[in-house]
Image: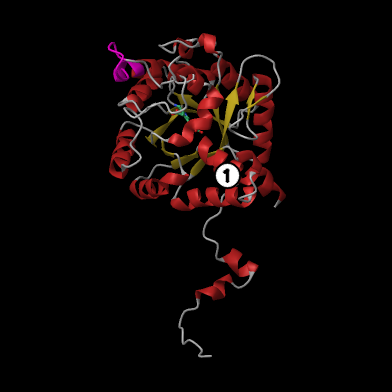
Amino acid sequence: MRRLNLPRRPRRLRRTAAIRELVTETAVTTADLVHPLFVIDGEGTPQDIGSLPGQQRLSIKDLVSECEELHRLGVRGVALFPSIEPALKDAAGSEALNPETLVLRAIRAVKQAVPELSIFTDIALDPYTDHGHDGIFNKEGTDMDNDGTVEILRQMSVLCAEAGADFVAPSDMMDGRVEAIRESLDDAGLIETAIMAYSAKFASAYYGPFRDAVGSASAAGTNLLGKHTYQLNPANRREALLETELDELEGADVLMVKPAGPYLDIIRELRGNTHLPVAAYQVSGEYAQIHAAAQLGWLDLESCRDESLLSIKRAGADIIFTYFAKDVAQRLQKA
Ligand code: PBG
């Protein structure tokens, strides 16, 4: 056998577990994670969500207990999503502006029980509209009414901030909404409420299970809601960066890329382009596909879960929204 004359043998640093750990470049910690949670009205027991194994819609009381537990585990934030009765939905999403609407009661209850936990609330109309879209339609019914929708999102943001949300998170992709929301929050004296903009939100098929969870799919009669006139074309990298730039100029405090796993290139590039924190949302479909393959015995759930999150962190995300947050926090606590 001929011995290779190699000046560099990178495998030396992979020889033992101790050395591998010493040269590890990236680690996901519990403090990076935000857990999305679904809330329902009433005192009922938790409802399973078929396409999101392990996730449930919770009553406010159970939501509060879950938030207490997440806080004990070291998770730093939760994103709250209401799943409301179909009877409360209409074309204008009016329930979003009801001062006693479910999500506002949920915010108040969680803030009171665990004030240290950061609360993110989604600002978009899809849980409230009978067509499942994030905004209201124009008179012709052909497209979203951008400016009319922004007017509603301003009011919705003020209500969520007054209820105690630490971050309002516009996920609607209307033009100009960040600046408008900042203006309305400031006018209302809510200068401390931060804006996390879903800046690079793609028109993705990976949102399917979420749409089951909040009922926007059943309201619309399809999981493949066409949101292409507002969400980004998955083919477009430059346009995504333009959206993040505009949101930064308009006053966003945190910029988000969503989904995460299929868009690691966007996370990486955004990380190099801004000094703001970058968040990434590992969406429902990314979570569901790992679970589905694991249920079939085709992939190992925990290793794939950890690898998927590590990749998102390595790409440059500072904050990761993931339905795996609790599982990971539990694993890290034991480690
Ligand atoms: C809606 C919203 C969506 C998600 C978060 N906020 C879905 C959509 O745009 O239809 C998806 C999250 C997920 O899939 O986990 N504004």
Residue 273 visible in rendering: yes
Dominant secondary structure (helix, strand or loop) of the stretch shown in magenta: loop
Residue at horizontal 51%, vertical 89%? 3
Of residues 238 and 182, the one drawn nearer to the viewer in this rendering: 238
Q: Secondary structure at mark 1?
A: helix
Of residues 253 and 301, the one drawn nearer to the viewer in this rendering: 301
Image location (x, y in percent) of residue 329 = 64, 43
Q: Does 293 appear above or below 173?
A: below
Dividing the picture into quadrants, the one containing residue 14 is bottom right
Residue linked to disc 1: 290
Magenta span has 89? no
The type of residue carrying mark 1 is Ile
Q: Is residue 215 left or right of residue 255?
A: right
Residue 120 visible in rendering: no
Residue at horizontal 56%, vertical 20%? 83
Image location (x, y in percent) of residue 205 = 44, 35
Magenta stretch?
138-149
